Amino acid sequence: GAVVSQHPSWVICKSGTSVKIECRSLDFQATTMFWYRQFPKQSLMLMATSNEGSKATYEQGVEKDKFLINHASLTLSTLTVTSAHPEDSSFYICSASRGMRADTQYFGPGTRLTVL
Amino acid sequence: KNQVEQSPQSLIILEGKNCTLQCNYTVSPFSNLRWYKQDTGRGPVSLTIMTFSENTKSNGRYTATLDADTKQSSLHITASQLSDSASYICVVGKAAGNKLTFGGGTRVLVKP
């Protein structure tokens, strides 16, 4: 149990375009979902926390207008990178929690974004 | 400031040998500590989770220890295998609030 999937697993896009990444909890309802970014050889950095049906809470330094997060249902959250630039190239990982607590989260397999 | 420091940053070990990874934290108030294994290009997978009252937890060849007094944890890998090559991340949960603090990870390379 507690499986989290992400789609796509990798994506290449041109600079200036927008990219949407989906995160799904397959066998449980996720009250809270988290989005992380990970640069090579670095650890995960929390970007935002989203609760179903409400606006996401973004970490300091993360542009909410650039990284649009939608948590429309208890099993799906999406991250849209708008007007992507090469510096947005990174590994994006989502996680989902049954409850409100961050310490019960299960991680997805990640999405590799490359912006040309 | 809540921090999680891991050492070493990386290590190379021969297949079949044991190794121990260290994690020191200053997160307070403490809730729990998890060790994750992250293969290259994949999301983290939980190995162990320990709360304040637990001082050891095993998962196959992985054994984690926790000393809540000194705020230290270790992850011991026994009889390493090539598939153990990965990054191992120590993550501490805070009792108050809803965030995790991630360590920088230790990159382990197991050579035949």
Image (cartoon, coloured by chain):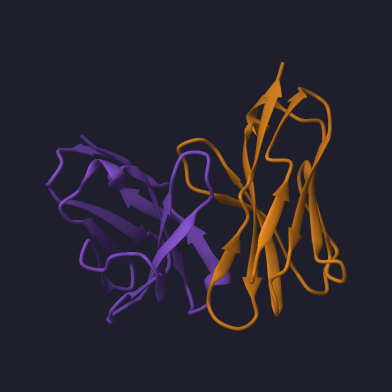
With respect to residue B59, does B28 lie above or below? below
Residue A45 position, x and y percent, is 47, 57
Residue A31 can be seen, yes or no: yes
In the image, farthest residue toward the left: A17
Tally of marks? 0
In the image, farthest residue toward the top: B112
Residue A62 position, x and y percent, is 34, 64
Q: Residue drawn 61% across and 50% down? A: B104
What colour has chain A? purple
Give residue A111's quadrant in the image. top left
With respect to residue A109, does A25 lie above or below? below
With respect to residue B100, does B105 lie above or below? above
Give residue B28's quadrant in the image. bottom right
Residue A87 position, x and y percent, is 29, 44
Q: For this view, does B37 lie left or right of residue B66? A: left
Q: For this view, does B64 lie left or right of residue A83? A: right
Chain identifier, orange in the render: B
Q: For this view, does A64 lie left or right of residue A33? A: left
Give residue A30's quadrant in the image. bottom left
Q: Quadrant of the C terminus of chain A?
A: top left
Q: Residue drawn 52% across and 39% down? A: A41
Residue A1 can be seen, yes or no: no
Residue B17 position, x and y percent, is 83, 27
Viewer-side residue, B87 vs B56: B87
